[in-house]
Amino acid sequence: MNELATPLEMLAAVLAFAGAFFFLAGAIGFLRLPDFYTRIHAPTKAASLGIPLMAFASMLLHLGAGFDLWIEDALIMLFVFLANPVSTQMLVWAAVARNIRPCAETIGQPAGDLET
Amino acid sequence: MEAAITILYQASQLMLIAAVVLILYRFSRGTSVFDRVVAFETIGLAVVGYLLLESNATTARLYTDAALGLALFSVVGTIFLAYFLGRGEFPNE
């Protein structure tokens, strides 16, 4: 129990801490930003960076211990990193289609060529 | 396992719990159904992160299966909710 930690375990712990920190920052942004379109970007971007960081830390530990379980961590990483931006984009398209109002500061700003 | 690593994992888990509390406040305030959908997805992903941290800290291997399944259900469920919302399926509040 009192043995010294290997550098791999230290690296995994620091990566997992960074992921949890991004997650907390995203939650604070989700709480404080004024309207839906500014509010959705904080937790979704933070989650699609934070979950792969934590899964990568778990993958490093499993690879170092010689378990085959690192494949599942790699699957979590790949899946969240690919599918979370897709669900965010679909939510914003649906919100534009249903006329959710943006806040007063962003009304009249160009929204790009958004087609729904 | 050195003491610093244990403290680091516990701090990470506390940060995730604080994030879930903040997201639950936004879930109850809402102001549109889309905020509630985003809160639902983000709480699911926070639980995934908590399970991954728990599996790192205790070297219990079964948590990873649960994390994979929960990540899959959370994100795919949000994609289908967005699909039905875009078709005008639920009221706006």
Image (tube, rainbow, N blue to C red):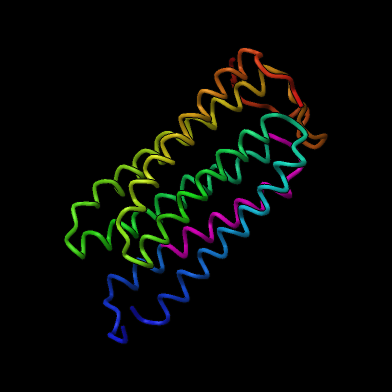
Q: Is residue B71 left or right of residue A88?
A: left
Image quadrant holding the N terminus of chain B, namely: bottom left
Looking at the image, which is closer to me, B6 or A32?
B6
Instruction: Decide: is B68 above or below B18.
Output: above
Q: Give the x, y percent position of residue B37.
A: 62, 33
In what quadrant of the picture does the C terminus of chain B appear?
A: top right
User: Residue at point 40% right, 75% down?
Assistant: B5
* Residue farthest toward the bottom in the current orientation of the protein: A2
**Is A1 left, or right, of A47 in this rendering?**
left
Region in magenta: A16-36
Residue A66 x/y as whole percent: 16, 61
Q: Position of residue A82 (x, y in %)?
A: 39, 36
Is residue B50 magenta-colored?
A: no
Q: Is residue A102 above or below residue A72?
A: above
Q: Nearer the viewer, residue B58 or B30?
A: B58
At x 40%, y 47%, the residue is B67
Let me know if residue A35 is in the magenta part: yes
Q: Residue at x 45, y 69 (%)?
A: B9
Q: Tell me the residue at 72%/44% (across/down).
A: B26
Query: In the figure, residue B51 lies in which quadrant?
Result: bottom left
Counting from the top left corner in percent of width and height, residue B72 is at 41, 36
Q: Which of the pair A3/A75 is nearer the observer?
A: A3
Kindly indicate the quadrant of the structure image that contains residue A4.
Answer: bottom left
Up the image or down, A110 lies above or below A40; here it is above
